[in-house]
Image: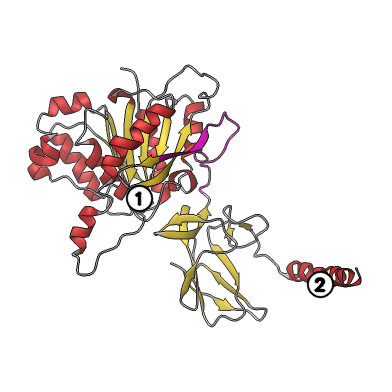
Amino acid sequence: MKNVLKVAMFFLMALPLVVNAQQNHVFPPGTQPNIHNINGADYPRIGEDGRTYFRVFAPDAKKVEISFRGEMTREDDGHWTLVSKGPEVVGFHYYQVIIDGVSVADPNGKPFFGMGKWVSGIEIPEKGVDYYKPKAVPHGRVNESWYYSTIRKEWRHCFVYTPPSYDKEPNKKYPVLYLQHGMGENETSWSQQGNMNFIMDNLIAEGKAVPMIVVMDNGNIEVFKTAPGEDPNQARQKFGADFPDILLKEIIPHIESNFRALTDRENRAMAGLSWGGLQTFNITLNNLDKFSHIGGFSGAGSINLNQLDEAYGGVFKDKKAFNEKVHVFFLGIGSEERPERTRNLSEGLKAAGINNVYYESPGTAHEFLTWRRCLHEFAPLLFKKK
């Protein structure tokens, strides 16, 4: 008992020292903790002007950096600090702490899967914009749904958003949007980095979007690798190549058997960002008997306008038939990621008689604010009755 009391007294005596050390630290004026910090973590911080402030405790390190931002400065107390040179672009951005050459997630931050690994995220507030934030409106659910893949011979899971009315109207069936992540991300990305559930909640509450189910699965494009001696271009052709069969033969049947989903092509849509956009084009344009709404957000694919009639098995050859089958063909991209490639494609398709919607996100690059904005523009177009 005496030993226990001695240990307890030791911790009680040491505790004020820790508290006082924290109290003596002065936060940069006008800053707030990053919204993705774990509870109680004060850093990273965001300034009113959009500058970022990092502070990492690594007393034995020789060199500490913040990815994409630069080398940190060592302080006398074993902390390392860095202040961004200027305001950062609004939206969500990945980062890692690099300690003596080893890249790790920030222990003060919540984890996000991006860049092919678990990393950290920082959010620069977008003033006056709240469409991807939680509001006092009815909220849907993001459910985790497991199934066995005979194609991959493994257990898999998808995340499924059901709208606020799903549990309240047990006899109602809903259209479905299959929404894919990009290279180096996974099935968690759209609900974590993308805030898709809040985007959908808010659009539905405002009457701008039809209540729908949204399915987010793993496109098998988490980490790009080449085998010894393999040509990278050939490896890219195989990257995620088994996903179309998984979606068509396993995921869609699983969703339609376990959720109240409408099962006709008129009530089925697909969209994806970056490499997920390529997967979307490859799946939907080769299977127009199954999809009627298509979205590419910074899509990695390309359509040769000079050989338009041969693309995707000739799906564009009969322009009238394509326009009748595809109710929405959406092409979105950020203004800072060479938008001319998608803009030219949109204009070329329109000149050839193919209906499409072009959206350009102002001031954003290949990043989640571009894709949040794309989803916000795309979702209201879906499943509208003629």
User: x, y (%) of residue 293?
Assistant: 29, 31
Query: Which residue sits at x=49%, y=28%?
Result: 163
Report how many numbered discs are placed on residues in the image: 2
Decide if residue 301 is on the left or right side of residue 196: left
Residue 188: percent from left, percent from top: 45, 47
How far is disc 1 from disc 2 in space, using C-alphas?
47 Å
Q: Quadrant of the N terminus?
A: bottom right
Going 26% across and 64% down the picture, which residue do you hit? 226
Q: Is residue 139 magenta?
A: yes
Could you say whether the residue bearing mark 2 is in a helix, strand or loop?
helix
Amino acid, disc 2: Ala
Which label was assigned to residue 372?
none
Residue 380 in view of the camera: no
State the residue position of label 1: 182
The answer, for residue 319, to whether it is visible in the render is yes
Instruction: Check disc 1 and give the amino acid type.
Output: Gly
Mark 2 Cα within 10 Å, few/some/many (few <14, many 20+)? few
Q: Which residues are magenta?
A: 126-147
For this rendering, which residue is in front, 350 or 160?
Answer: 160
- Report if the CB atoms under discs 1 and 2 are less than 8 Å apart: no
Residue 14's disc number: 2
Q: Picture coordinates of residue 290 (x, y %)?
A: 25, 29
At x 12% / y 43%, what residue is drawn? Answer: 305
The quarter of the picture where the C terminus appears is top left
Element type at mark 1: loop
Quadrant assignment, res 224: bottom left
176 in the magenta segment: no
- Classify 355 as above or below 333: above
Q: Quadrant of residue 45?
A: bottom right
